[in-house]
Amino acid sequence: MLTTKLINPEIMAALSLCGHGSKVLIADGNYPLAEKSGPAKKVFLGVKAGLPTVTDVLEAIHSVCEIEAAAVMVPEDGSTPEIFAEFEKELNGMKLTPLGRYEFYDACMSEKPGEALVLAISTGEKRTYANILITIGVA
């Protein structure tokens, strides 16, 4: 029996294949995961609207992996979604790299070596712009 926060077997298996620099997307329930995550392993976790949240999944992954960088999709109007403060708190104040919507999609679709997404997770998150692209760090 696992004693970590992260217990999903598909996510654990995918993370075990990651190395330094691997990319993982944690997406809100509005994100077009099937179309905008390239050949990455896809895991659909949404149980109902709002569950689980992106921050729930980020916390669980962070409990088993070092995270060295994070990028977020930013609104075109220049506003800062409230969830970004939650991301920064979970990541111990890490500066989030802002990407426009299509720039974020491009980053999640890249198939270049060292840039390709390894894992894409869809959540039940209903807040908009609650998408985070994390880079796995050194253990």
Image (tube, grey):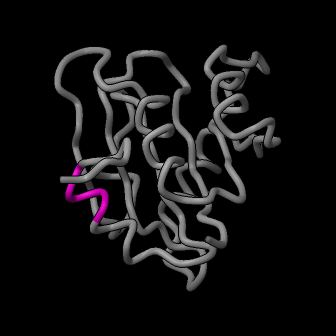
**From the viewer's perspective, is residue 109 above or below residue 122?**
below
Q: Position of residue 88 (x, y in %)?
A: 72, 32
Give 102 or 61, whichever is nearer the viewer.
61
Give 116 or 56, whichever is nearer the viewer.
56
Q: Position of residue 139 (x, y in %)?
A: 61, 71
Q: Position of residue 121 (x, y in %)?
A: 34, 47
Using residue 42 as the reference point, say whether residue 97 is left or right of it: right
Seen at 40% across and 52% down, the residue is 36
**From the viewer's perspective, is residue 111 above or below residue 85?**
below
Q: Quadrant of residue 30?
A: top left
Q: Quadrant of residue 87?
A: top right
Q: Quadrant of residue 86?
A: top right
Using residue 34 as the reference point, say whether residue 65 is left or right of it: right
Seen at 39% across and 66% down, the residue is 15
**From the viewer's perspective, is residue 43 above or below residue 78?**
below
* Secondary structure character of the magenta stretch overall: helix
Q: Is residue 14 magenta?
A: no
Give 52 or 71, whichever is nearer the viewer.
52
Give 119 or 8, whichever is nearer the viewer.
8
Range shown magenta:
8-12
Seen at 34% across and 41% down, the residue is 32
Q: Position of residue 126 (x, y in %)?
A: 39, 16
Seen at 22% across and 43% down, the residue is 44
How many numbered discs? 0
